[in-house]
Amino acid sequence: MFVVCLKFIFIPLMKKKKIVVFSGAGMSAESGIKTFRDTGGLWEEYKIEDVATFEAWIKNQPLVLDFYNQRRKQVMDAQPNEAHFLVAELQKHFDVQVITQNIDDLHERAGSKKVLHLHGEIMKCRSTAKQELIYELKHWEIKKGDVCEIGSQLRPHIVWFGEAVPEMDKATDLAEKADIFITIGTSLNVYPAANLINVIEGHIPKFLVDPGDFNLDYIKNLTIIKATAVEGMKVLSQKLNELI
């Protein structure tokens, strides 16, 4: 009688490289969502102090509600563009964390599983009195008189100018763990979010996809792809495939 001893060798799975994608308004522009700062952007139609501050909310809630209701309606009608899908496809070969300045849900609808919104989410609302009370919205409109469970008026779940960015510390921690850091469609002018690229260590490969002009010579290992989000992500996807 022969006894066969089988020796099992466990080979650990290779850990996926971590990509952190930091996206801004240019990411969703090709989905038809207006940016704020560019020519024809929202700030040419509205003043920041009238619709995007807590003072505006106290002064004229109907105007602020209508502004964000229209933004929400626009987001619900929009579709993810090819750049959103290309970012989501990176999950096949990389551990991908998206950090976005955008308040839309297009990254999620394109299939990205890990998305951190720095400036809030248009498809959510929260209590004015207690910011921890946050609710999902299935429709485009918040009305005057819509209240939370403690009777406080519901407001857009948005970080307004002058308010703290509660997810900033978490975003910084995530960015510092990146093996590859990608910035897409942001002017890098909105702080503190714009500072994320500065916390990445020098040896980490960094990519910037945007058609604008930047003076970032001080950032080490930075490759600039001067293109829109869609065209730039086509180029970058090919570059990243070489790292697999």
Image (cartoon, rainbow, N blue to C red):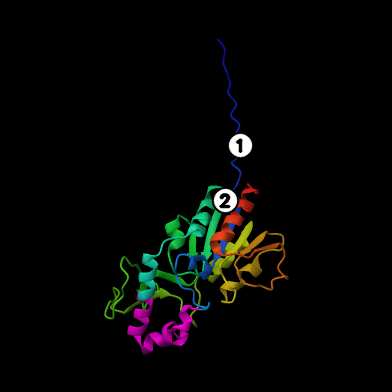
Which amino acid type corresponds to the residue marked 2 in the rendered image? Phe
Instruction: Pick whichever of labels 2 and 1 is earlier in the sequence.
Output: 1
Which amino acid type corresponds to the residue marked 1 in the rendered image? Ile
> Is residue 161 toward the left or the right of residue 178 in the image?
left
Residue range highlighted in magenta: 40-69
Residue located 45% across and 54% down the image: 111
Of residue 101 and residue 174, the one placed in the foreground of this image is 101
Residue 43 lies within the magenta run: yes
Q: Which mark is residue 94?
A: 2
Where residue 237 appears, as percent x and y from the top left, is 59, 53
Instruction: Return the residue at label 1.
Output: 11
Say if 147 sits above or below 23 in the image: below
Q: Nearer the viewer, mark 2 or mark 1?
A: 2
Q: Dot 1 lies on which element?
A: loop
Image quarter of residue 4: top right
Hey, which residue is sitting farthest left in the picture? 145
Q: Would residue 133 be seen by someone viewing this image from the given angle?
A: no
Residue located 45% across and 65% down the image: 31
Where residue 132 appears, as percent x and y from the top left, is 39, 72
Q: Which mark is residue 43?
A: none
Of residue 216 and residue 83, the one placed in the foreground of this image is 83
Where residue 149 appears, as percent x and y from the top left, is 28, 73
> Is residue 15 toward the left or the right of residue 219 in the image?
left
Image quarter of residue 219: bottom right
Say if 208 sits above or below 90 in the image: below
